[in-house]
Amino acid sequence: MRPLSYWQADANRLDELAFCDRNPYPLLIHATTGYQLQSLASMSQTMDRAVLAAADRPPTSPSGIDDYLGLEVKTRDGSRRFQLTLGCNPFRDVVIDDVTVSNLHAHFTVDRHGNWYLQDASSLTGTHVNDKDPDPTQVLVSGDRLSFGMVDTVFMLPSQAYAMIRRLI
């Protein structure tokens, strides 16, 4: 995951169409003021992936661009495929390094019309869309809240990501 400010320079100098052309992939946006990512490498080595309590400090509302992380939903190698994998394993297409995210946690699928779908891959801690189990035929829309274990993200298509970044700067 990268700070959302990584995309700020493009949003500052490009109009929406040029921004979307340069950054064609949806983003998973994670607010750092809630649950703090817990890397398995930084924890004591354990075989269990127990669900951890949320951060000790009470969550606060994000106040600026520095309170967000973004992760592009794209293949690791840049190829075009209809199914992408998400998990904590660095060989997955979309990597979320957190102890509550399984090695293979979920699958993203994109159809030929550009519609995105999400399915749980029998993860230990669950995958949810807007606090419900994902329906494999439900199209994801910008603003959907996707949860992988305890990691809450918001799915944003490029045009909505552009609008959000412009609003935060």
Image (cartoon, rainbow, N blue to C red):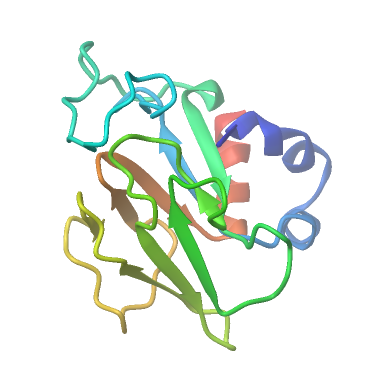
- Residue in the image at 45% along x and 37% along y: 97
Q: Quadrant of the N terminus?
A: top right
Residue 3: horizontal and vertical position, in percent? Answer: 59, 29
Q: Is residue 4 above or below residue 112?
A: above
Residue 82: horizontal and vertical position, in percent? Answer: 56, 80
Q: Nearer the viewer, residue 158 or 28?
A: 28
- Residue in the image at 75% along x and 53% along y: 19
One can see residue 116 in this view:
yes
Residue 24: horizontal and vertical position, in percent? Answer: 69, 62
- Residue in the image at 77% along x and 37% along y: 12
Q: Nearer the viewer, residue 42 or 96?
A: 42
With 54 as the anchor, is 104 left or right in this view?
right
Q: Nearer the viewer, residue 6 or 95?
A: 95
One can see residue 27 in this view:
no
Q: Quadrant of the C terminus?
A: top right
Q: Is residue 24 above or below residue 152?
A: below
Residue 77: horizontal and vertical position, in percent? Answer: 72, 60
Where is residue 158, by image quadrant?
bottom right
Where is residue 136, by image quadrant?
bottom left
Report how many numbered discs are placed on residues in the image.
0
Identity of the residue furthest to the bottom in this view = 112
